[in-house]
Image (cartoon, grey):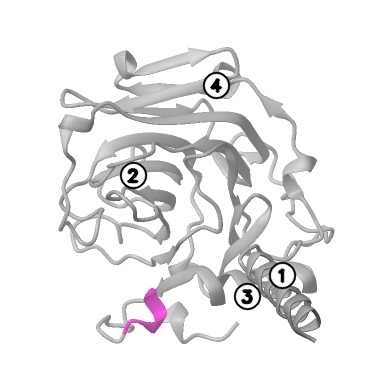
């Protein structure tokens, strides 16, 4: 009887552990858009933008770093008006508070003071705490001066410092979708022209000091005793309509549907991730003035 009880409790323990492990990882999205786009070498699609002395290219991987003297950034050769843009990134372990490693779309140089931007930003952290992945959308100067952000913040279901993971932004005339390892985590729809970026943008990557706000609203600053702060990028992918493409260029998709959108399974997985790993949604922030972000209440 004692032996039977022992095996029964062992079985319960194993089932509990299995369920705990399984529940921490998203279900399969059923479709893997990154496989639809070929990888290319950094120099075929990008150039250094700033901090060339803080940038190193080793075969297929680009390493950029921040120290007390400078950070670094890169920019795509061509602007795009829609497309899929991805890269695999590995982040630095340890104390990285105040440091942002970013992959994003922007037209800031073409429209200074009145630009559009779509961000995937990794906000540095302190010892023992996870990175924050902040997704954001700025439209026609909402990121300039009186900033009106559209932030959604996530923790990840893996340690982004242990290896490379693929992060992507999909931008079409109808929607923006953020993906992590082909798992959609956020969909931002075009509900009106005033709340959606429509002008061509370039693709960027960077690492820089944002101590004033990056980690717990600026509570923890960059500590250069731990420099250099390093970000590694590889497996670059891009596909879509460049700004120079004919007007009949057809936008790509991140689902089996040529018209865009997500499958029912992809939508379910996105909802699952938001339920388990999203901890901030600007539309649910009662301190925000939502008259400035009408997409929060506009129906499509």
Residue topped by disc 2? 111
Residue depicted at x 36% and y 58%: 140
273 sits left or right of 213 in the view:
right
State yes or no: discs 2 and 4 in contact (Cβ < 8 Å): no
Q: Nearer the viewer, mark 4 or mark 1?
A: 1
Image coordinates for residue 186, horizontal then vertical, percent? 56, 65
282 in magenta: yes
Residue depicted at x 59% and y 47%: 168
* Nearer-N-terminus badge (3/4): 4
Q: Nearer the viewer, mark 1 or mark 3?
A: 1
Residue topped by disc 1? 14
Tell me the quarter of the image containing the N terminus: bottom right
- Between the C-alphas of marks 3 and 4, the distance is 33 Å
* Nearer-N-terminus badge (2/4): 4
- Between the C-alphas of marks 3 and 2, the distance is 35 Å
Q: Which residues are magenta?
A: 281-285
Image coordinates for residue 39, horizontal then vertical, percent? 69, 29
Residue topped by disc 4? 61
């Amino acid at each position: 009887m004692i032996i039977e009880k022992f095996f029964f409790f062992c079985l319960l323990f194993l089932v509990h552990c299995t369920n705990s492990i399984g529940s921490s990882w998203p279900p399969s999205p059923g479709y893997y858009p990154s496989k639809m786009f070929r990888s290319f070498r950094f120099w075929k699609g990008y150039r250094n933008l700033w901090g060339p002395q803080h940038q190193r290219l080793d075969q297929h991987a680009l390493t950029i770093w921040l120290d007390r003297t400078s950070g670094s950034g890169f920019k795509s050769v061509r602007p795009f008006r829609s497309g899929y843009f991805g890269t695999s990134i590995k982040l630095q372990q340890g104390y990285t508070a105040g440091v942002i490693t970013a992959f994003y779309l922007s037209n800031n140089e073409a429209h200074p003071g009145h630009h559009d931007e779509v961000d995937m930003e990794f906000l540095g952290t302190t010892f023992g705490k996870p990175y924050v992945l902040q997704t954001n959308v700025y439209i026609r100067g909402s990121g300039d001066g009186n900033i009106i952000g559209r932030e959604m913040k996530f923790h990840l279901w893996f340690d982004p410092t242990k290896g490379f993971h693929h992060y992507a932004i999909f931008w079409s005339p109808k929607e923006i979708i953020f993906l992590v390892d082909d798992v959609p985590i956020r969909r931002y729809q075009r509900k009106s022209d005033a709340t959606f970026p429509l002008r061509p943008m370039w693709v960027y990557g960077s690492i820089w000091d944002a101590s004033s706000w990056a980690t717990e609203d600026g509570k923890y600053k960059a500590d250069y005793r731990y420099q250099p702060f390093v970000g590694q990028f590889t497996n670059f992918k891009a596909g879509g309509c460049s700004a120079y493409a004919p007007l009949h260029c057809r936008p790509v998709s991140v689902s089996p549907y040529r018209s865009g959108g997500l499958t029912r399974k992809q939508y379910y997985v996105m909802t699952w991730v938001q339920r388990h790993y999203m901890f901030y949604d600007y539309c649910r922030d009662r301190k925000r003035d939502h008259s400035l972000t009408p997409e929060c209440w506009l129906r499509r």
